[in-house]
């Protein structure tokens, strides 16, 4: 008496059903939605107007233009957090069990989360671009460079999703995920050229910041958008001199290392 | 070889951190039958359900569900089953209708048919009005109904319901029982777990009592009750001074020495023909002009069942540990 399936099961189809669910979740959780919209907008406004006058950009240029690359980078790095939270919620409220009792590939659950979060990552990028433009951020670059800049953001967002999956599978509870985000991810995004040029930092922090991929992502975006801080001074550390290459290496390394680890850890976390 | 059983488990073993959750469990459920796994907390009911629904793999043993092997062909199993987990797993951030539609889509009904099926099920479970609201606003009973509806989306051959009525008020519980009755009339095979003997009694043809991951009794409700001790004649005297006289009457009617609780002024004894016994006792009490506070037949409770079947109270600490040596051996 089993009802016959009407459509051919496909991995992409199942993934999309689960991704749509994830997108609905985001729409219906005001907290999550504000993380992706209001918060980055507020950051742009606060930093542009509160610190804008106090921080001088090396080589001249307006702080508002320097700021945007950093704020994009920070938001993208924080993107890891959304997937991790969504996964650990699902793991804790039995949703994963429900999915796994259905005739779908188990990997489509993970893929659905990844797709939903990649789409979610685009939202703040759009919002920040608009806010930035309103407060005076300008791009001084050709179409190809602009596309490359936004492409780099998407690529790095994709990489961060795998860190998020790993985090969401390793940490048992949503509260734990939040704790790690605060203790690990938050400092990482600040000990970087996010809001201030690395040259202003004390020596140890300066070295960390120079090799921090958040810095290189920020600098790569500044470089591609023709904003101040995008050209490294002579004799700068290699990551600062080659921000685009260094960022791409990080993105690739994260995907190559974290994706298999994340999938393995996710499978371990759901087995018992 | 095709089998007539919807569920066939052999020698299921599952150990968590050195502790046996399932200890060589064998289980057969015929097609169209309702089987209740009855047991206290930690008996292994959920573990059994998780193995049979392919959510977890056993350390040893095999299981066939709807003719497919849970280990070698889990997809075929998943196509034929519906699972309502112990904690209702409705998605609070989706509406009732979206919840059911999503499950239908993941069963590959196609979006249009999934939607139609969702509407149909909402109506069947009296959730039509709530169908457009987010499920996080549902009451416990509505969640349970939605969860149950979700298991039925693809009209599965075998249903697994893990404590479907826990947390429901008596009315909601009765409503759910009625729904399950209709499913059974429709020919579904159901494996349900419960901690309540009366529920197992009400719903199941076949009751399997588990404890420590082992089956300690099985049968239909009548044979089980016979093992448990059947009905108990129970009387509470209005005046403690009548206790001896009443004890003597009960002993005569029941044919066995009753147990007496002087503090509660009560006398209890197992009886065979319950209704006749109660009539005889009522007559005797009237004749002797003894007033009673309570007179009736008591069904054996789960406590009684466990006292009788395991010889120990259903209390974690009081139970003998499973021998560690048994956990190494494989079937
Ligand atoms: N994922 C797990 N990790 C560790 N131990 C587990 C796990 N799942 C179950 N157990 C243990 O296995 C035993 C059986 O648990 P199970 O959940 O199957 O019992 P149950 O009969 O469903 O109990 P309840 O009536 O409380 O739901 C328990 O001792 C439990 O602590
Ligand atoms: Mg259980």
Image (cartoon, coloured by chain):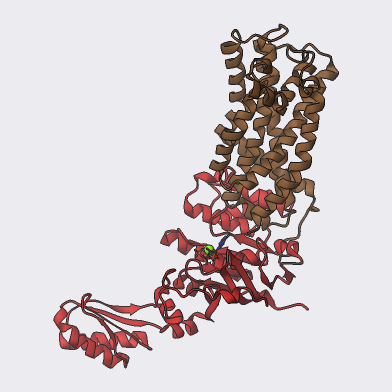
Chain colours: A brown, B red
Is B238 placed left or right of A225 in the picture?
A: left
The answer to whether residue B97 of the structure is visible from this angle is no
The answer to whether residue A180 of the structure is visible from this angle is yes
Q: Say which quadrant the N terminus of chain B sits in.
A: bottom right
**x and y, in percent, of residue B247 in the image:** 23, 87
**A166, above or below A208, in the image:** below
* Residue at 81%, 22% in the rendered image: A242
Towards the viewer: B123 or B95: B95
* Residue at 57%, 55% in the rendered image: B147
Towards the viewer: B76 or A170: A170
Is B155 placed left or right of A244 in the picture?
A: left
**B50, above or below A205, in the image:** below
> How many numbered marks are there?
0
* Residue at 50%, 44% in the rendered image: B137
**x and y, in percent, of residue B245 in the image:** 18, 88
**B317, above or below B271, in the image:** above
Towards the viewer: A218 or B249: A218
**x and y, in percent, of residue B182 in the image:** 57, 67
Which of the 4 image quarters holds residue A59?
Answer: top right
**x and y, in percent, of residue B172 in the image:** 46, 59
Towards the viewer: A27 or A133: A133
Q: Say which quadrant the C terminus of chain B sits in.
A: bottom right
């Amino acid at each position: 008496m089993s009802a016959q399936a009407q459509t051919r099961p496909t991995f992409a189809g199942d993934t999309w059903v689960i991704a749509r669910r994830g997108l609905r979740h985001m729409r219906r959780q005001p907290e999550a939605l504000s993380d992706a919209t209001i918060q980055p907008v507020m950051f742009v406004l606060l930093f542009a107007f509160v610190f804008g006058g106090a921080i001088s950009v090396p080589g001249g240029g307006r702080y508002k233009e320097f700021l945007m690359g950093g704020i994009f980078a920070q938001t993208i790095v924080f993107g890891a957090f959304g997937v991790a939270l969504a996964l650990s919620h699902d793991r804790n409220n039995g949703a994963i069990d429900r999915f796994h009792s259905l005739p779908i590939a188990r990997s489509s659950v993970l893929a659905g989360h990844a797709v939903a979060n990649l789409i979610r990552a685009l939202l703040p990028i759009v919002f920040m671009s608009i806010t930035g433009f309103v407060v005076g951020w300008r791009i001084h670059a050709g179409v190809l460079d602009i596309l490359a800049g936004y492409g780099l953001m998407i690529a790095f967002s994709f990489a961060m999703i795998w860190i998020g999956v790993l985090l969401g599978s390793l940490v048992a509870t949503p509260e734990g995920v939040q704790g790690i985000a605060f203790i690990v991810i938050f400092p990482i995004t600040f000990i970087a050229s996010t809001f201030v040029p690395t040259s202003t930092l004390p020596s140890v922090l300066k070295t960390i910041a120079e090799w921090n991929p958040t810095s290189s992502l920020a600098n790569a975006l500044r470089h591609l958008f023709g904003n101040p801080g995008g050209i490294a001074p002579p004799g700068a550390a290699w990551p600062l001199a080659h921000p685009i290459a260094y960022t791409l290496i990080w993105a690739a390394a994260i995907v190559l290392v974290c994706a298999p680890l994340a999938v393995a850890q996710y499978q371990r976390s759901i087995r018992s | 070889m095709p089998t007539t059983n919807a569920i066939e488990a052999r020698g299921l073993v599952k150990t968590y951190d050195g502790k046996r959750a399932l200890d060589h469990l064998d289980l057969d459920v015929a097609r169209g039958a309702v089987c209740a796994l009855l047991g206290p907390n930690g008996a292994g009911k959920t573990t059994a359900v998780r193995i049979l629904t392919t959510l977890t793999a056993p350390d040893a043993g095999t299981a066939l569900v709807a003719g497919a092997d849970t280990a070698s062909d889990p997809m075929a199993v998943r196509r034929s089953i519906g699972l309502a987990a112990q904690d209702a797993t409705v998605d609070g951030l989706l509406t009732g209708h979206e919840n059911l539609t999503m499950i239908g889509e993941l069963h590959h009904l196609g979006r249009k048919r999934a939607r139609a099926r969702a509407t149909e099920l909402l109506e069947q479970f009296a959730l039509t009005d709530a169908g457009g609201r987010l499920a996080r606003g549902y009451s416990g009973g509505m969640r349970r109904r939605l969860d149950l509806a979700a298991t039925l989306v693809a009209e599965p051959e075998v249903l697994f319901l893990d404590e479907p009525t826990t947390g429901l008020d008596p009315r909601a519980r009765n409503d759910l029982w009625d729904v399950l009755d209709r499913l059974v009339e429709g020919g579904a095979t159901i494996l349900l777990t419960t901690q309540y003997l009366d529920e197992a009694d009400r719903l199941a043809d076949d009751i399997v009592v588990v404890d420590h991951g082992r089956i300690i009794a099985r049968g239909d409700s009548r044979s089980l009750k016979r093992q448990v001790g059947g009905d108990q004649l129970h009387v509470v005297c209005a005046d403690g001074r009548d206790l001896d006289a009443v004890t003597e009457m009960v002993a005569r009617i029941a044919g066995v020495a009753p147990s007496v609780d002087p503090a509660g002024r009560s006398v209890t004894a197992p009886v065979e023909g319950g209704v006749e016994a109660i009539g005889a006792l009522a007559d005797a009490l009237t004749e002797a002009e003894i007033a009673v506070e309570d007179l009736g037949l008591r069904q054996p409770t789960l406590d009684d069942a466990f006292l009788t079947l395991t010889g120990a109270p259903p209390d974690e600490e009081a139970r003998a540990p499973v021998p560690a040596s048994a956990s190494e051996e494989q079937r």
